[in-house]
Amino acid sequence: MSKISPTIADDAQSDAQDNNLDQNGSRSNESDAQDDVDVVKMSERPAGVRLVYAFVENSGRLDQIMANLQSLFLAPGSLGDVYLLSSESVSWLLPPGSHHISLPQTQLTGLHCGLIPLAGTTTITSKGLKWDLDEGQLKFGSLVSTSNAFLSNDVHIKTDNHLLFTMDIIKSIS
């Protein structure tokens, strides 16, 4: 069994750091690298770690939300796959290629998702969503797939560019 040792990046409030460091076996990484977002400021990925869950909240300052999204582009080289997990949603970056997202067998009604072309014009084909696309183009100022929904527990997405996939947290599995 692996022990998870969370890192608190340097933008965390000092009282939060003081309250959590000793209790949780965490460490603080202070950095003067103003050009790096907090997730990237963490030390390099420990051996055996394939993915990182960054606990974030998607409310408050828009610049901090954008920094979290920027981390999805910057972290794979040093940290592996990064998932942004909040109290309401989980988001991750789909690199160019084909992807299969498998949801647990649960009620899909009211479960939302979005496909956001953060890296520019993106051509996608999707299967298993309420508003599937067949070689459709997503781009800001034109079409962005927000407030989409799941029709199937198995979703297939093919993209020619990096694409943010975001979805509601499944609160209960029936």
Image (cartoon, rainbow, N blue to C red):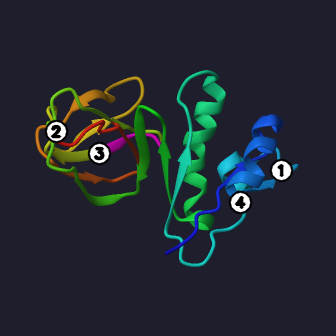
Say whether disc 3 or disc 1 marks the residue closer to the N-terminus. 1
For disc 2, the marked residue is 129
What number is the disc on residue 123?
3
Question: Residue 113: where, in percent of width, then height?
Answer: 29, 34
State which quarter of the image contains the C terminus: top left
Q: CA distance from mark 4 to mark 3?
A: 44 Å
* Residue at the limit of the structure toward the right, as seen here: 32
Q: CA distance from mark 1 to mark 4?
A: 24 Å
For disc 1, the marked residue is 33
Find numbered disc 1 in the image and state the secondary structure of the residue it sits on: loop
Front position in the image: 26 or 80:
26
Whether residue 38 is in magenta: the answer is no
Find numbered disc 2 in the image and state the secondary structure of the residue it sits on: loop
Q: Residue at x 88, y 49 (%)?
A: 32
At label 4, the amino acid type is Gly
Say whether disc 4 or disc 3 marks the residue closer to the N-terminus. 4
Q: CA distance from mark 4 to mark 2?
A: 41 Å
Q: Which residues are magenta?
A: 119-123
